[in-house]
Image: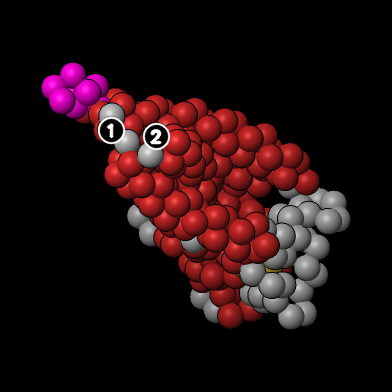
Amino acid sequence: MAVVATIAVVVAIVAIILGPPLLWIRARVVDESGFTSAVRELGETTEAREYLADTITKQIAAHAGKVTGVLARPLAVRFTNSEGFADDVADLAAQAHEWLFSPPPPGVDPEVMQLDLTAMVRRVAGQVTPGLADKIPTIRVPVGQNRPALEAGRYRPLAERVSRWGTACVVVAALASMVALAFSQHRGVIVAVLGVGCLLSAAATNAAATYLRKRATAELAVADPGMARLGGKAVGELLDNLHEWVGMLVRSGAILIAVGLLIAILF
């Protein structure tokens, strides 16, 4: 019985270490709504406002002339400082997510990510000159400067693996923990050891955050400077959310260790 309990608790710890980081990736990176929710505050940053105000102004100038572009600049700035701007940035985040996690759309170069800014440009253009919005064509702004640059569907296989392994780890952790508790005569020790597993998972999640930051920096190296800064802020928003998970794991681990030690002392 002791051997079974030992094997079960080791399996449970491994699953606990791997499970939370994988679940976070599934909830905040793979899932589109979770991703856009995590980076929603991006629309309130100076980087997003400056980059998109500049981009909108340049697009209007390219299609309606430099003089009109000069007139559009203050309106673009006012638009990026409006309350609804966060929704537009969230839409861009959803576009980027769909590009990276879905098959490439037909008729579009799959090797270079493109974001559709048509609605934003037309909104500001309509404020500059009545009827100008109708003359603005579909505007897709490439994110990368070199090919390939953030290819369409790049992370689709990874998303499928993360979803499978995340769910499997949760199931295995639960079953192995119950087996360990059922076969062990020292249940307090088992509970405390599971708490240690949570602390190890927090450390693994911190390591995953460091890796994700380095990987994102490398991926954004192909983008133009303004988009790279914007992407960097989005990564920062995601990692802030990840650190909240780390805090939850640390608290959970500490509670389990305290409860386990109390059980071991009293019983």
Residue at 54% x, 60% y is: 164
Could you tell me residue 168's position as x and y percent?
49, 56
Left/right of residue 132 with respect to residue 9 in the rendered view: right
Q: Amino acid at mark 1?
A: Gln
Q: CA distance from mark 1 to mark 2?
A: 8 Å
The outermost residue toward the front is: 1
Q: Report the residue marked by disc 2.
A: 2
Q: Amino acid at mark 2?
A: Ala
Could you tell me residue 185's position as x and y percent?
28, 33
Within-10-Å neighbours for mark 2: few <14, some 14–19, many 20+: few
Report the magenta stretch's main SS. Answer: helix
Q: Report the residue marked by disc 1.
A: 185
Sequence-wise, the earlier of marks 1 and 2 is 2
Q: Quadrant of residue 5?
A: top left
Residue at 65% x, 57% y is: 158
Along the line of sight, which residue is nearer the eye, 244 or 204?
204
Could you tell me residue 176's position as x and y percent?
41, 47
In the image, the segment drawn in magenta is 260-267
Camera sees residue 67 = no
